[in-house]
Amino acid sequence: MFKTKSLIAAALVCVAPLFAHADKLADIKSKGVVRIATTIDAPPWGFTDSAGKPTGLDVELAENVAKRLGVKLELQQVTGANRIPYLLSNKVDVVIASLGSSPERAKLVSFSKPYAAVFLGVYGGKGVPKFSKVADLAGQTIAVPKGSTPDLSLTEMAPSAKLIRFEDTASVISAFLSGQAPMFAENNFIAQKVAEDNPAKGIEMKSLIRISPAFMAVQPGETALLAEMNKIIDAKVADGSLAALRLKWFKDEQKELK
């Protein structure tokens, strides 16, 4: 009898993790803090202002999320490459870092509804030709942020392109401006800022990759937290504050999100 009870107890210990599932939303409200990952090297999504304070569309959206949850915000700076690892290793609760979706990423995280959309493209300066199709970039050298949506997209769509991968967007732009790479891949608003800051370069889009919506992300299975993020996005769409946020940081009106 004792042996039977021991076996049952051991079995319950083994299967307990399969049934135990923490409610991240409840944890956030209990602790009074939400940890949100964002980049601060990719204006206008996220960057530091003249006073050294993080700001930008993603940063302000993170502040809005914390306010609507009624908790304090703990911002965690991430790069394109470590956004998802930070989430999966439980260093953050939510990712709001200009994160695009892909089939591979969808296997790892749960995406919210989109909150913004941009154009992904390959950009270059004077003397660099335009390419009508992404596949025509075969053999071309392009700087990309490692693990970013442009990196993943070009790897799939132009497998013969020579991608130079850097840890963050700032390093990508530095490599392009120094002549280490004749082109770089990013979204149109980051490229626009680089072009404005370096008018002599004559920077323009050389090839359109695709339209890329940006999503919040949470750990798989966190249905309550995901539902709350979607409620926040819906509320900001309904009251016009999401459109106002877009206009403030991107200086344009958001078209239909898909």
Image (cartoon, helix red, strand yellow):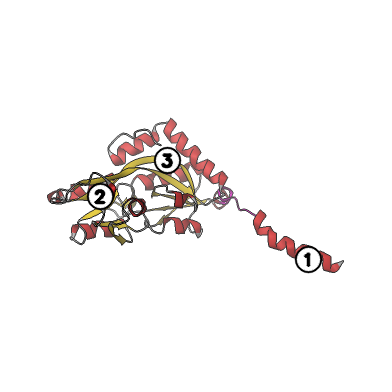
Task: Find residue 192 and report its image quarter.
Answer: top left
**Numbered disc in front, either 2 or 3:** 2
Q: Which residue is mark 2?
A: 136
Q: Residue at x 34, y 35 (%)?
A: 254
Q: Which residue is mark 3?
A: 114
- At label 2, which amino acid type do we have? Asp
Mark closest to the chain's N terminus, 2 or 3: 3
Mark closest to the chain's N terminus, 3 or 1: 1
Q: Which residue is mark 1?
A: 7
67 to 27, vertically: above or below: above
**Numbered disc in front, either 3 or 1:** 1
Give whichever of 8, 55 is nearer the camera: 8
* Residue 131 percent location from the top left of the image: 22, 47
Q: Is residue 36 left or right of residue 54?
A: right
* Residue 232 percent location from the top left of the image: 47, 39
How far separated are the C-alphas under marks 1 and 2?
63 Å
Q: Residue at x 32, y 43 (%)?
A: 210
111 to 256, vertically: above or below: below
How far separated are the C-alphas under marks 3 and 1?
48 Å
- Circle 2 — which element? helix
Structural crowding at the residue carrying mark 3, measured as other residues with C-alpha within 10 Å and reported as few (<14), some (14–19) or many (≥20): some
Which region is colored magenta? 20-27
